[in-house]
Amino acid sequence: MSRISLELVNLYKYYGRILALEDINLKVEKGELLTILGPSGSGKSTLLKIIGGFEEPTRGEVYINGELMNGVPPYRRPTSMVFQDLALFPHLNVFNNIAYGLKIRKKPLNEIRSKVREVAELLHIEELLDRKVTQLSGGQQQRVALARSLIIEPEILLLDEPLGPLDVKLRKEMQLELRRIQRKLNSTWVYVTHDHEEAIVMSDRVAILNSGNIIDVGTIREIYERPKNRFVAEFLGETNIIECIVDSVEDNVFTAFCGDLKIEGEASRKLEKGEKIQVMIRPEKIKIIHHPPPANKNTASGKIVEIIYKGAYSDLKIEVDDSKIFTVKTFEPIYQVGEKVFIKWDSRDVTVISG
Amino acid sequence: MNLKKIVGRKLSITLLYSLPAVAYLILFFYIPLITIIIYSFWHGEPLYRITRIFTLENYVRFFTEKLSQNVFILTNLISIATFLVILIVAYPIAYFLARMTYGDVGLKIILLILIPLEMNYLIRIFAWRNILGENGLLNNLLMTFGLVEQPITIFFHSLYAIIIVVLHNALPYAIIPLYITIRSIPESLYQAAMDLGSNKLSVFFRVTLPLSMPGIAISFLFIYVPMMGEFAIPALVGGKTYMLGNFIVRQYLTIGNWPYASASTMSLVLVTLIVMFIVFKFLGVRRLYE
């Protein structure tokens, strides 16, 4: 049994005549962490501001726990936001920043004290309560901002690229920690980011936003492996997209000619013979072999034209017979530019992304 | 060796550049100030009779005599009251300009507010005499419309007249620092406060007002300090109101007790410095530098 925490229905937002959000429909279940992933300018922050009540939608409805929230000011909504610039109060120390929401709610002082302590312990900042917020490091400020929002126990926590200013190492730590806290509290979080790796690590489900439209919603795995279109496929990391013409379809398995290549895969939808399609194969699904493969489908031969060293692995750019460039991920740093190799992949890993 | 030479030359050039300013300050500020300090420790009597012996009697007299005590307290009260009146008028204007206008519209409006200050100080005071006076614009209007029978005197030659004139003179000095501090509060802080449950009133008292304290402190200094030494405005529109500035002028020019006048001046400087120190220390002006 799951309950819907947040529901957006036919949401539109115009700034003057500029369309910022178009026909957004979204449901978030209680206890779920939904990431809104999109490039900058895609409308993710606007969407978050509408949920938080800082902006009113031009059309459409926002429901939180089934209650219509249109026209309800931020201070009467059961949401709380962790701002992109954190927006800690510079005139208050850490304790008072965290206690702000409870003080507004006129809670007794000893209750405030014990709750602040509780939240501070959850976030490992109990040592910092007397400090000024200006004396904290970026990561510590992050935690204070989170504590300040969590203490009022919002129905939905909104996070607007909160890890943006942190360095990579700290980011990765915080991502895991945020995830841990979210699971522990079992609360609903809507997390906005433009970083697909962050989305992959953090989310239960992802909504991909581009120029004001939700293009795809689903678990990160569904979207990564079966993206709806080329934009989504490319946004979630490097990939190989090949133009093909369907040759035959049989029992859900199709064969297609892509230049000199013959690709076989599962047809995720109905395909016609002669139809032009794009298929996607992720770089890590392609294997390099040194001997010519027995079959003539889902394989190619080519020459390594570039090696991009990435530490734990390398990306190889392999030019196959008819000048197509494949990106292949390998963990074995034994290849050299100019080397001739064969590649193959499994028909399970071939995804049709558009017709 | 070489470095020393370069540093030495740099230093001497810097000194050369600062020479005019230093000379000016020494000649027209420090020498007079030191003269006043020296005078304040001599024995003096009316009509410029001065005995050059060291004494603290002038200071003791200033802080113990009923007349000077009263003038001192009254001057402080007027200065603080004026500041409060100006703050009440200036804050909403600054708040509006900082939060409701886009781009540099607010600054342009502030420039408009500044234009009257281009006019000479004394001329402005005399202009106010013509507006507030017994046969002035205000009373003429009130009588023409039959609102009063007799000219009202409350705004003429009174404490209120002082406050009105200073309000007009000093308003921009309050609006500008307030505008700048309110403007510098990030929008997201208001949003965060609302997000955490503050309604508009609570946002104002818990976020806007505390964060504009530096601006309030600076406008206090801009208004309080000159007001403590003001003598032209009380003399011209203040009627019987007698402020510390007038007291000192009278001691110097009419009574002619220079040592006592000097001690009063130094006491004024000292008190002002202490107040400035307290304001800087406790009203968060330092936060401006952090």
Image (cartoon, coloured by chain):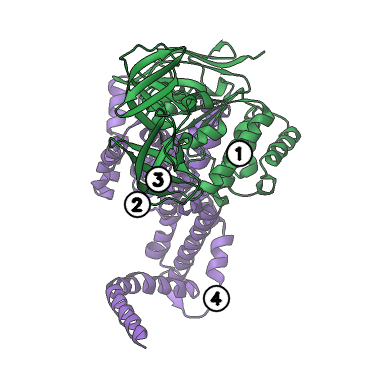
Position of B280 relative to B198 (above/below): below
- The reply to whether discs 4 and 3 touch (Cβ–Cβ < 8 Å) is no
**Label 4 – label 1 distance at C-alpha:** 75 Å
Figure chain in purple: B
Position of B167 relative to A80 (above/below): below
**Residue named by callout 1:** A176
Chain designation of label 1: A
**Amino acid type, label 1:** Leu
Image quadrant occupied by the N terminus of chain A: top right
**Residue named by callout 2:** B232
* Residue A37 pos. (x, y %): 46, 29
- The reply to whether discs 1 and 3 touch (Cβ–Cβ < 8 Å) is no
Left or right: B28 with respect to A32? left
**Residue named by callout 3:** B177
- Res A222 seen here: yes
Q: Are marks 4 and 1 on the same chain?
A: no
Name the tint of chain A in the rendering.
green
**Label 3 – label 2 distance at C-alpha:** 25 Å
**Residue named by callout 4:** B55
**Amino acid type, label 4:** Thr
Q: Are marks 4 and 3 on the same chain?
A: yes
* Residue A203 pos. (x, y %): 56, 29
